[in-house]
Image: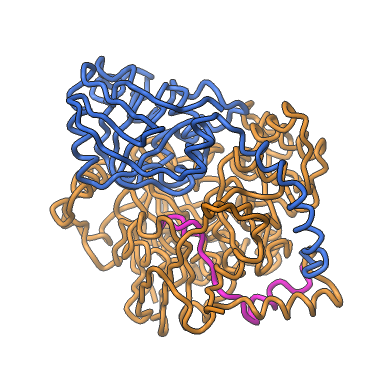
Chain colours: A blue, B orange
Amino acid sequence: MEKFEKLTGIAAPLPMVNVDTDMIIPKQFLKTIKRSGLGVNLFDEMRYDRQGNEIPDFVLNQPAYRDAEILVAGDNFGCGSSREHAPWAIKDFGIRCVIAPSFADIFFNNCFKNGILPIALPQEQVDLLMKDAEKGANARMTVDLENQEITTSDGQKIPFDVDPFRKHCLMNGLDDIGLTLEKNAAIDTFESRLNQTRPWM
Amino acid sequence: MSPKTLYDKIWDAHVVHEADDGTCLLYIDRHLVHEVTSPQAFEGLRMAKRPVRAPEKTIAVPDHNVPTDPTRLQGIKDEQSRIQVEALRKNAADFGIEMYDVDDVRQGIVHIIGPEQGWTQPGMTIVCGDSHTATHGAFGALAHGIGTSEVEHVLATQTLIQKKSKNMLVKVEGELPPGVTAKDITLTIIGRTGTAGGNGHVIEYAGSAIRALSMEGRMTVCNMAIEGGARAGLIAPDEKTFEYIKGRPHAPKAAQWEMAVEYWKSLRSDEGAHYDKVIEIDASEIAPVVTWGTSPEDVLPITAAVPSPEDFQGGKVAAAKRSLEYMGLQPGQKLSDIEIDTVFIGSCTNGRIEDLREVAKVMEGRKVKEGLRAMIVPGSGLVRAQAEEEGIAQKLQEAGFEWRMAGCSMCLGMNPDQLSEGERCASTSNRNFEGRQGYKGRTHLMSPAMAAAAAVTGRLTDVRDLA
């Protein structure tokens, strides 16, 4: 997994609540058997018309935000389907950090498995970052995972929380499966106990 | 020892390892895989040369993108869908996983076949790369959706890295009025709590109205826990649960059955157990409901009118405005005046035999309104066969419904069953998101009985008015 340490980049504002994973990556793109190449279809139905032409109003089509690396969004971001294609598409587009007042649980987990940092902040702070993001390409934000701090384009600092284990994995680009396999003996012990106490399972 | 909730008990029974910061390694008893969210996980295993740790604890079934017309048995025409199903077949064979293939009568929606095969049992941890895994919680199992990276993790280690969620209790007491079903309960709860109301929680559904539900009804309620934002939904197992499981192919047998039932009986929340959040709902106040917008929280009784964006606060004002525009509705319009083009009956929410019986009951002596497309997609091949045996299938076909093969179908429109632009559907599925059932398609969620009523009149209809 790609490491996440510190990121300075353009933040795109998407002031919508309940952005669901069907919006992030519509179903027709779930038929792939690969993880890569989904960035071009990120937010497909909001981003393109039926003929495949860009809809100029959509934030990621605006010249200022085409290279956005941070997304600032409304409450309950990533709700709906468990499709990991959603974070794959976000990452493939080039976005490494999503900031919102809250996230849906599965999406939130999926982000960490793909080197994306989701940050939940109180509404007032998201509002402030949304305003900063609306300034456009010259207003670059910094997300510093080690110090758990966002710096706005005018130097304002906003601290954020992150689970220590997930922070450790992100900062070091660690593979979960490798870590778990180190605990193989504990899994073996659990399984043999399970076979005795609940053999039907 | 302090009193525990049902969730606490299942959690505690599955912790393999707990780190100082509370991060746990949780053992997974059952894993269900389907064709859409698993290919990348198997590819990951191959690249790392890792085997599947416990193939006997995993089953595979294609459901999301399989066509529902009988010609699918001659091969799936859509190339990408075909490749995904072929990949599942190869992965199941290579890694020693049991699969119910497209031509197997046991094939169906992954969350329908788990319970049907007796694979889903109380006290288990069950996962699947699909958010509606919450369905299995109806059996008192801790069941939730996971992403593809986690699918790979479970395949390789039979565990998941987890942090415990909070406990939430949703208590529904009293008797449901006539015409009101499990779907109305679950939609009403989401209407009350919002789609983020359960974020970070596991919901336990309790109360006399929940206990009174059949296993099918309980599955409908738990299925939509995810739409309320919860990690999982669960219901304490009881005699109904045991009766449902008994004798199914994967149910415990002989002496192990007695042992299992004794254990299952211990799976209930202790008196005085702590819940971080409690919601109480009076069952007698629940009406048949429909959704009007593009979020499952946009729920209103069928007797109500379309709301105005000004009725909301915060970010929901803009969301409601966008929803109304997308749905082509005007504030103040009566919900029962909304005309539809399509009726979809099926999905992991409402594709079980009881749902089809409910539709058949409403359709008794009635016909699908001329010009409507009305489709029934049984949740599994076995549900389909049972409905045929009971004579329901024939009656519903005579009433004007299309009778399809099993799959997820128009719930998410990954197969050819889709709405076209502007088409409006009365749907028994679980999500009314923009584009969910087809590009610019418009979805109204409701119970099977309400969808049948809409099929009769061609508009959203209070099923009680047909009585």
Which span is picked out in magenta?
A: B223-248
Residue A97's x, y, as percent?
38, 31
Horizontal side, residue B48 vs residue A164: left or right: right
Q: Is residue A135 visible?
A: yes
Which residue is pictured at 35% across the width and 76% down the height?
B281
Taking depth in this image into account, of A45 and A66 the one nearest to the observer is: A66
Q: Is residue A145 magenta?
A: no
Q: Quadrant of the C terminus of chain B?
A: bottom left
Q: Is residue B224 magenta?
A: yes
Q: Is residue B376 visible?
A: no
Q: Residue A34 occupies which quadrant of the picture? A: top right
Horizontal side, residue B462 vs residue A189: left or right: left
Q: Quadrant of the N terminus of chain B?
A: bottom right
Which residue is pictured at 83% across the width and 74% down the height?
B256
Q: Residue B74 occupies which quadrant of the picture? A: top right
Q: Residue furthest right?
A: B254
Horizontal side, residue B127 vs residue A95: left or right: right
Residue B287's x, y, as percent?
34, 73
